[in-house]
Amino acid sequence: MEKHKVDFYNIPIVDYLLSIGEPLESVGHNYYQHKHHDSLKINQRKNYFVWNSRSSEKNSRGGVVQYMQIMHNLSLQETLSKLSEDLDGKVLPAIPKKSYPKKFNYPNC
């Protein structure tokens, strides 16, 4: 039996954090913040967070991996193990890939 590989760096940050009970609140279209740390902002569209009050610290911005490291004080190995365990058997929506037309047609002016 082949085990499903998880792309840890492309896990949808908001969906994952809500699935594990992180206290997030919506603050606008595609934007969330932590209920207890109002300087921690998440851009759902870009799948990215930044913790402004801790900006000088390592892992104060990034994706799910960096969030778990700074918020829960986990090592990289502990983070990857937790993500594997939490996502075992779960299907989170995929992050939509950007697509651009192969050729741009200028309108007749």
Image (cartoon, grey):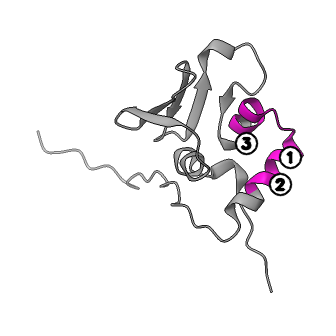
Q: CA distance from mark 3 to mark 2?
A: 11 Å
Looking at the image, residue 43 sits to the left or right of residue 65; the answer is left
Which residue is situated farthest in the bottom direction here? Answer: 1
Mark 1 crowdedness (10 Å alpha carbons): few <14, some 14-19, many ≥20: few
* Residue 77 appears left or right of 36: right
Q: Are marks 1 and 2 in contact (CB under 8 Å)?
A: yes
**Is 49 colored magenta in this rendering?**
no
Q: Mark on residue 78?
A: 1
**Is the residue 108 above or below the residue 101 in the image?**
above
Q: Which residues are magenta?
A: 67-83
The mark that comes first in sequence, 3 or 1, is 3
Q: Residue at x 50, y 36 (%)?
A: 24
- Residue 81 belongs to the span the image colors magenta: yes
Identified at 58% across, 67% down, the residue is 91
Q: Counting residues from the N terminus, which is met first, the one under dot 3 or under dot 2?
A: 3
In the foreground, 40 or 97: 40
Q: Residue at x 66, y 71 (%)?
A: 89
Which of discs 3 and 1 lies nearer the camera? The answer is: 1
Mark 3 is surrounded, within 10 Å at the Cα level, by few (under 14), some (14 to 19) or many (20 or more) other residues, namely many
Q: Residue at x 66, y 43 (%)?
A: 64
Q: Give the numbered dot on residue 3.
A: none
- Say what amino acid the circle numbered 1 marks: Glu
Label placed on residue 81: 2
Considering depth in this image, is 44 or 22 the residue closer to the camera?
A: 22
**Residue 65: mark in rendering:** 3
User: Tag 3, which secondary structure?
Assistant: helix
Amino acid under label 2?
A: Ser
Distance in Å between CA atoms under marks 3 and 1: 10 Å
